[in-house]
Image: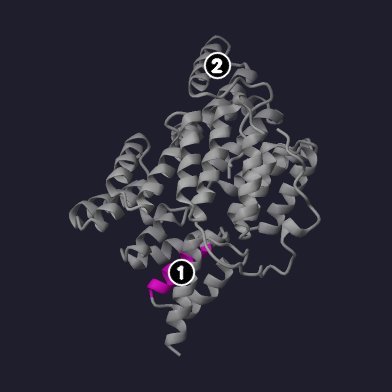
Amino acid sequence: MQPTTGRTPSTTGRTPWTSRGTSVPPIADAVDIAPAIGMPGAPPTSAEGLRQRIAEMELRLRDRPDDPGAAILLADALLRQARATNDGRAAHAAGEALGAVLKENPGQYDALRLLAAVHLSRHQFTDARDLARRARDQRPDDAWNYGVIGDALLELGEYDDAFDAFKTMVSLRPGADAYARVSYARELQGDLTGALKIMQMAADATTSHDLEAKAWYTAHIGELYLQLGKLSEAEREYRRAAFLFPDYPHAMVGIGKVRAARADHEGALQIFLAQLNRAPSLDLAARIGDIHSARGNSCEAERYYQLAEDLAGPPAAQTEAALALFLADRDRKLGDSMRIAQTVARTRHDIFTEDALAWTLYKNGRLDEAFAVSQRALRTGTQDQKIRQHAAAIRRRLTSSW
């Protein structure tokens, strides 16, 4: 999610969803956007509230192991904790709790709908879509299901169907969850100003009862300002998010990105290192390596680049294009980078996967294929800076070879 200039027309052959007669409703009561995690009547979601709820539900389940309500509330809290801490183990535990409920009662609706969100958080997008559709078939008037369906379809690159799902969600229950999805739809189509306005609606519509969600929306407002090149506004929103939910990783990493954009390498490094220690990831290790590289410290840069590869796991096990893009951007293991992107692109056709595929093809000298794929990555009208820069570089190289 980065910024920039003019809008590329959609090549889908359909009018952009935001123009198909769907206006955003008046203000009422999100990634990879924020799935609406939460069960009706769940307790507040401060950091302490989440810890207390997890402890209470675990205690309740020790006394009554067959209590589906406790298992579902535990899973809800764990899933929120996973998003609040970037700890995938919490999402895994949430899935296990819900799986136990569904083993006893395969049609248990609340467990089914929440398990779809667990699959989404674990990037199991086909499973998330299929489970959410099962839940929708049980209760077609539940807006939640359309949000999860749309989220999964976005990640699979099925944009028109995803936008239609969000349209249904808005019509059933206008509120913060729906506004966040509409905002991301606008963002994907290059309307960053519209996306910013609607994400602000989502944040404004969220009360102090759900501080984690409010922090997520606020941090994403910061992300949109960062894409627009408005660093002061971006930092302000990231700091607001960190105040709402202390040490919120999305907010803290955002502050680090602002510092890096201002060439405050030491300040950015401190934040990224702290976050890496809390929740190690390829992205953070790569950012730290890039800072060391920019400062001329090639040995430290290489140490963190190798850590990034180690955290991602072996090339054959990749289900995301992040490692492929990391390798291609830094001219590392270019053959592996292309093979990873090709494998991921067999099942995912979103613009970010296609950008990674185009860039790895380009780095491996396959210019004609790279150009064709790069044009598909532009099809939504995205203003994502990296996607557009890659497409421009591929076009320049191709035309210079004619």
Quarter of the rendering containing residue 88: top left
Task: Write the residue at 48% across / 78% down.
Answer: 395
Label 2 element class: helix
Q: Left or right of 355: which side holds 36?
A: right
Check the image and report above or below for 208 versus 163: above
Check the image and report above or below for 381 versus 165: below
User: Mark 2 is on which residue type?
Assistant: Met
* Residue found at the very far bottom of the displayed protein: 402
Quarter of the rendering containing residue 100: top right
Q: Earlier in the sequence, mark 2 or mark 1?
A: 2
Write the start and end of the magenta stretch as one range. 354-364
Quarter of the rendering containing residue 134: top right
Query: Residue 69, image x and y in percent?
Result: 64, 19
Query: Residue 36, image x and y in percent?
Result: 63, 36
Q: Is residue 358 visible?
A: no
Task: Write the residue at 57% across / 39% down.
Answer: 217
Please give the residue where the numbered disc 2 appears in the rendered image. Answer: 57
Query: Residue 357, image x and y in percent?
Result: 47, 66
Please identify the quadrant where the C terminus is shown.
bottom left
Query: Residue 263, image x and y in percent?
Result: 32, 53
Q: Nearer the viewer, mark 2 or mark 1?
A: 1
Q: Left or right of 319: which side holds 130?
A: right
User: Mark 1 is on which residue type?
Assistant: His
Give me the C-alpha separation between circle 2 and circle 1. Answer: 48 Å
Please give the residue where the numbered disc 1 appears in the rendered image. Answer: 390
- Considering depth in this image, is 369 or 46 the residue closer to the camera? 46
Residue 357 falls within the magenta-colored stretch:
yes
